[in-house]
Amino acid sequence: MGMVLSVAVVLAYVVLLTYVAVRARAAREFEEFSLAKRALPLALVFGSLAATYVGPGFTIAFVGRGFNSGFLFLGIGLAYALQNILVGLFVAPRLRALKNCHTLGDAIGQKYDRKCQILAGIISVGICTFLAAVMAHAGGVVLTDIFDLPSWSCVIIVVGVTALYTTFGGLRASVITDAFQFSSFAILLPITLLFVLLFHLKGGAATFAEQTSVATVDGFGSVSLIKIIGLVAAFLLGETLIPPYANRALASRTTHISRNGFILAGIFSVVWFTVMISLGITARSIIPQDTAEDLVLLKLVDTIMPASGYALLLVVLVSVVMSSLDSLLNAGAVAFTQDIVKPFAKLPDTSSLKIGRSATIVIAVIAVACAPAVPSIIDGLLICYTIWASAILPALIIGLWIKNPRPLAGILSMGVGTLVAMIAIIFFFIFPLIIDVPAIIIPALCSSLLAYALGHWIDKKKSGA
């Protein structure tokens, strides 16, 4: 009976979500598909930003980390909150102020040259695709728990449904469904924490404090200083203006809305991380200690909730996955069209829209194929963070702030940053006991910055300026 109820609730949710997406209206122009005609109000920018980053990494994975290492990861998560606020104050308004800019590649192309735009586009599409694979992996974990089907079929279901409404509705459908999903999980998961604390945690506050102390001490004892530094750097820089976030900044109605959307999302993330870590800590005295990290939240909800509550929370977790996945599919498709195809061919709007929709489907298929290779949600995110922060951030941030950015500096920074990050990641897969994922970001980012400085110096010397 519980299984039937879970399946029924999930299917009803998918139908409702599809209705919301259909009501959002299919995109008829590339400008609408990519940036929702730059008309998003503050509520949608904030809700969509929050829904996009509050994916499985910041829910399922953070609960698992709270279970294993207490409040260690809350401190690391605060670096992410700070990043959002800093982007809102100093970067997003500058990005939104650029004219005729659809993507980060567009912004880099305006500041440097077309070659830099194409390279930035290739990196953007790659990052969106592999982040989508991480989301697909997480969606497979949740749906496997609901339907008890093979993991591969669950991955296809969650990606297929998400790709369907994203392909036709574009950014508008993504943003509106994100806001709808955000309103559900932003309420229900904190209520779950209160439910656990009030009715299922024996010993109440004293037990919570004890488990917090034990888990946090164990967490600091099991993690090296260099790994903590790497984690802070990864969460501070790794998701900074990744394509879905940049699209929200560019699609906002004004620079003021762009700034405030990021600041509010950063403040919200502090509350969210606290709730997720706390859920993980409460689970320590309720479920077995040997529970796999990515299954802690599912096991906790299954243990404490009646069948109806469990079904409802599973729906929330599905929405968490889809709200991040749809944004990545759309952002990757827009980057492919705008930064890789358009620099070589002047396309009419209808052709751009068709290419964008086709790219959405291709990225979804690749994400499904790559999902089984994801080691874990957090490790998958950290690998993508390392590449993005090293490959794009130095060229993007410096280019937005200095007066005459040099094309050679941009191309060298992106190329070297990508190469060093990829080599380090390959070494991680070959020697996982020697190399930590979080620590990879430090040499990769330093290499990118040094390459930028070298390119700037050479280009400046050549021009004599």
Image: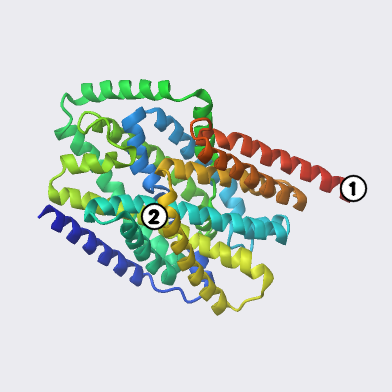
When the figure is inspected, residue 287 is found, relative to residue 301, above or below; the finding is: above
293 horizontally vs 170: left or right: left
Q: Are marks 1 and 2 in contact (CB under 8 Å)?
A: no
Q: Quadrant of residue 75?
A: top left
Residue 168 versus residue 148 in the image, above or below = below
State the quadrant of the N terminus: bottom left
**How far across and down, in percent of the image, does residue 152 sit?**
34, 57
Percent x, y for residue 360?
47, 66
Q: Which residue is mark 1?
A: 464
Q: Residue at x 57, y 64 (%)?
A: 336
> Amino acid type of disc 2?
Ala
Residue sitting at the far right: 464
Which circle's residue, 1 or 2, is located before the other in the chain? 2
Q: Secondary structure at mark 1?
A: loop
The coloring applied to the image is rainbow
Secondary structure under tag 2 reads: helix
Judge the density around disc 2: few (<14), some (14-19), many (≥20) Cα neighbours within 10 Å.
Answer: many
Q: Residue furthest front?
A: 430
Q: Amino acid at mark 1?
A: Gly
Give the labeled residue for mark 2: 136
Q: Residue at x 36, y 57 (%)?
A: 322
Please state the horizontal and vertical placement of residue 446, each as a whole percent of the image. Answer: 66, 36
State the residue in front, 403 or 464.
Answer: 464
| 241 is higher (above) or lower (below) than 234 | below
Residue 395 versus residue 303: which sits nearer the camera?
Answer: 303
Q: Nearer the viewer, residue 379 or 231?
A: 379
- Residue 6 in the image: above or below residue 190: below
Question: What is the CA distance from the residue labelled 1 to the residue labelled 2?
Answer: 50 Å
Q: Residue at x 41, y 62 (%)?
A: 174
Would residue 239 be visible to someone looking at this image?
A: no
* In the foreground, 423 or 275: 423
